[in-house]
Image (tube, helix red, strand yellow):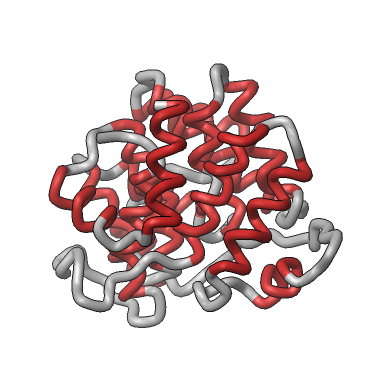
Amino acid sequence: MKGILGAICGDIIGSTREFNSIKTKDFNLFTKKSIFTDDTIMTLAIAKWLCEDKDSRDVLIKNLKYFGNQYPHAGYGGMFKKWLSQESPEGYGSWANGSAMRVSPCAWAAESLEEAQKLAELSAIVTHDHPEGVKGALATSDAIYLARIGASKDEIKNHVEVRYQYDLSRSLDEIRPYYSFDVSCAGSVPESIICFLEAGDFEDTIRNAVSLGGDADTQAAIAGSIASAYWDIPRDIAYKSIHRLDYRLLNVLIEFEEEFL
């Protein structure tokens, strides 16, 4: 199984470690407290937008607001909470990683890299219109799209480094000892991509992301969204994640997969 479920699996697995960080890859993937958070909800809001009208900014905003307000306690940032309450919301200059955590549907709905970039930019700028916020979404979406069409890890790494000037030459062993909670795109998206680049499979990617000890659910969602375009998601991980979705979210996932996958 591939697709946007990779971001959802990462979010759910990382949810128990967002504020209880660890620096090891040796942990239980799922516990009784493993839940979906804003990463999953916003990913599926983007998916719903793409199913309805991927050219419409208004439909995008409508779905972000609808799903955000249906799940008001999912862990949104303060500025996004305020955005959800506004009648005609505008971008608020955010450089945070919320733009990257939700972008994966854009890479799966697109028929070319250029279209993926167009969709990713639109998905970001309605809230995260700071250049770093847009850049984080674009870099993540590009990596997913390239993985989806069969690019190698080296090709993905080189593309992201050249186009977005992210330093992907560091190793996780170099990053991990000094890394801490960081919600910025600049301080979390490159690290999430490295988690994928160093991994041997989907599960290893998620374990890498959580083991950094940072914004675990979001970094695992970003890394997982790339990994699930490159490898299949193991059946047990997919099942345990899907089982934690409610019917509203599950129906969007099914609708998106039927239309684009």
Q: Can you see residue 153?
A: yes
Q: Image height check: is 205 above or below 95?
A: above
Res 162 quadrant in image: top right
Image quarter where the C terminus lies is top left
Measured as percent of width and height from the top left, residue 131 is found at 75, 49
Q: In the displayed structure, does residue 246 sit left or right of residue 183?
A: left
Image quarter where the N terminus lies is top left
Res 149 quadrant in image: top left
In the image, what residue occupies the spot 51% across and 32% down? 107
Q: In the displayed structure, does residue 70 sit left or right of residue 194?
A: right
In the image, what residue occupies the spot 59% across and 28% down? 116
Measured as percent of width and height from the top left, residue 42 is found at 54, 56
Measured as percent of width and height from the top left, residue 147 is found at 39, 28
Q: Image height check: is 148 above or below 106?
A: above
In the image, what residue occupies the spot 72% across and 72% down? 79
Q: In the displayed structure, does residue 62 sit left or right of residue 139?
A: right
Measured as percent of width and height from the top left, residue 8 is found at 37, 53
**Along the line of sight, the residue nearer the viewer: 255 or 150:** 255
**Along the line of sight, the residue nearer the viewer: 73 or 139:** 73
In the image, what residue occupies the spot 84% across and 64% down? 87
Q: Can you see residue 164?
A: no
**Along the line of sight, the residue nearer the viewer: 56 or 148:** 56
Res 156 quadrant in image: top left
Q: Image height check: is 249 above or below 76?
A: above
Q: In the displayed structure, does residue 111 sit left or right of residue 257?
A: right
Numbered-mark total: 0
Q: Image height check: is 60 above or below 217?
A: above
**Along the line of sight, the residue nearer the viewer: 89 or 246:** 246
